């Protein structure tokens, strides 16, 4: 069983990385417009997204904030950090 769980992990990590990448690109595309987490969920997962799709976007926000690429503000808005904006400029995003 342990091997089976290990085999599934890369798939989950790949999907998480895909969502994080899409989210960061979207936030950088919208910058300097500030958006809420709920708006990002609707934008990336759709209006009628199921729990798993909504949770994936919210997890991505938490992971990117923990990595220092997003700020969550007290008023519920999500913005890229200066480092993320600079990185996006270097990549031409």
Image (cartoon, rainbow, N blue to C red):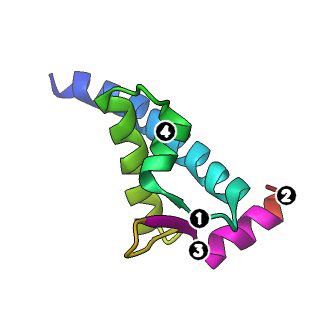
Cα distance between the residues tagged 2 and 4: 25 Å
Tell which tag, 1 or 3, sits nearer the viewer: 1
Point out residue 37 in the picture as x, y percentages from the top left corner. Answer: 44, 54
Tell which tag, 3 or 4, sits nearer the viewer: 4
Q: Quadrant of residue 62?
A: bottom left
In the rendered structure, find residue 92 and report the number of the disc placed on it: 2
Mark positioned earlier in the residue sequence (3 or 4) = 4
Residue on which disc 1 sits: 34
Cα distance between the residues tagged 4 and 1: 15 Å
Above or below 73: residue 15: above
Mark positioned earlier in the residue sequence (4 or 1) = 1
Q: Given contact means CB atoms under 8 Å apart, are the residues at marks 1 and 3 in contact?
A: no
In the rendered structure, find residue 50 and report the number of the disc placed on it: none
Q: Quick one: 58 or 36, which is closer to the camera?
A: 36
Q: Quadrant of residue 32?
A: bottom right
Above or below 62: residue 5: above
Q: Given contact means CB atoms under 8 Å apart, are the residues at marks 3 and 4 in contact?
A: no
């Amino acid at each position: 069983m342990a091997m089976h769980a290990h085999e599934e992990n890369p798939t989950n990590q790949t999907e998480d990385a895909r969502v994080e990448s899409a989210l960061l690109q979207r936030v950088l595309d919208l910058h300097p417009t500030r958006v809420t987490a709920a708006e990002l969920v609707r934008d990336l997962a759709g209006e009628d997204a199921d729990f798993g799709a909504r949770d994936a976007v919210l997890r991505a926000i938490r992971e990117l904030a923990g990595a220092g690429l997003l700020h969550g503000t007290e008023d519920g808005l999500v913005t890229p950090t200066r480092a993320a904006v600079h990185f996006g400029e270097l990549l031409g995003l």
